[in-house]
Each structure stands twice: as C-alpha cells, then as structure tokens.
Amino acid sequence: MSGNAITQETITHLIQQALQARRHSYAPYSDFQVGAALLAADGTVYTGVNVENASYPAGVCAEKTALSKAVSEGQRQFTAIAVAGGHRQEDSTALRDYCPPCGVCRQFLSEFCAASFTVITARSVTDYRTYTLADLLPCSFEKRQLDRTSGAEV
C-alpha cells in the first residue's frame, strides 16, 4: 500500500469530507451509502455520492460523481481520492469495512489520474488504507491504445 506524498492533515480532511458526503447518498435499494472526496491538483476538493436507480445499471458511483463534477468545472489534474461506504444503519464515523472503488470507477479514474494517484479507503478518520491507482488497476485501458499512429496493438 502506497501513494503520493500527501500530508496526514490532507488525508484526514479528505476522509472527513467523504464521510460527510456519504450522508447525502441516494441508496433506497441497497441501503449501501458511499461518499467520495476527490482532491484536485490545485487543492480544490470535489465530493460525490452514489445515486441508485430503480433500473440498477443506470445508477452512478460516488467516485464517478466526484470526478464528473470536477471535470465539468474544468479540472483535469488530480492528486487523491478518499472513499467511505457502508450500510445506512452503520455509524458514519466508524464503518465496518473498507470500500475500495469498483473496477469501473478505477478505469474511470485512470482517464485523468496518474498511476501514482492516491486512493484512500476509510472506515474512519484514523482507520484507513492507502493505495496507488496502479496498485488497484495494474492493467488499465489507456488512451494510447486508441491511437492508430502509435503502433500499439489494440
């Protein structure tokens, strides 16, 4: 488990933001609420929550919500994300399990984030794990693979 050199204060702040955002989750079907706090390179934090839909595939994850908000406001460079998730009845400051990004979110993050991007999965502000995006997604599908002039095989 590793990541960019971000301060303990920044990690704590991101986890607090993810835990707070989690309260706004819309999860009437699974009761599994997820919050995310994405740190842009300029220091701005964008939060997101999971938003479920009766047509299950139409729902969106917290990480994708945060990244979409940031990109829609012109951000293109990111440093870290904290993710916190658990069932509605769990104490929002001490969750039972870590909630890593799903595979689709890992790929979605890889579009804008370097392999060294820090992913924090948190149960609380003092109980968390850190990874790099490369740790969680060692073989991402990249833009270069779509470049017909690069000679790369698709």
Image (cartoon, rainbow, N blue to C red):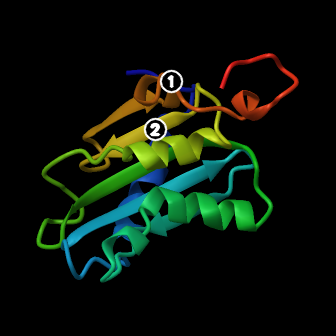
Left or right of residue 44, residue 21 in this image: left
Foreground mark, 2 or 1, reads: 1
The quarter of the picture where the N terminus appears is top left
Picture residue at 64% right of the left edge, 67% below the top: 69
Residue 81 % position (x, y):
50, 46
On screen, residue 124 above or below 88: above
On screen, residue 40 above or below 115: below
Cα–Cα span, label 2 and label 1: 16 Å
Picture residue at 38% right of the left edge, 78% below the top: 24
Check disc 2 and give the amino acid type. Val
Left or right of residue 70, residue 33 in this image: left
The residue that disc 2 covers is 119
Question: Is mark 2 in CB contact (under 8 Å) with mark 1?
Answer: no
Residue 135 % position (x, y):
43, 23
The residue that disc 1 covers is 139
Check disc 1 and give the amino acid type. Cys
| Within-10-Å neighbours for mark 2: few <14, some 14–19, many 20+ | many
The quarter of the picture where the C terminus appears is top right
Q: Observer-nearest residue: 70 or 57?
A: 57
**Which of marks 1 and 2 precedes in the sequence?**
2
Q: Looking at the image, can residue 147 be seen?
A: yes
Q: Looking at the image, can residue 12 be seen?
A: no
Residue at disc 2, secondary structure: strand
On screen, residue 131 above or below 107: above
Residue at disc 1, secondary structure: loop
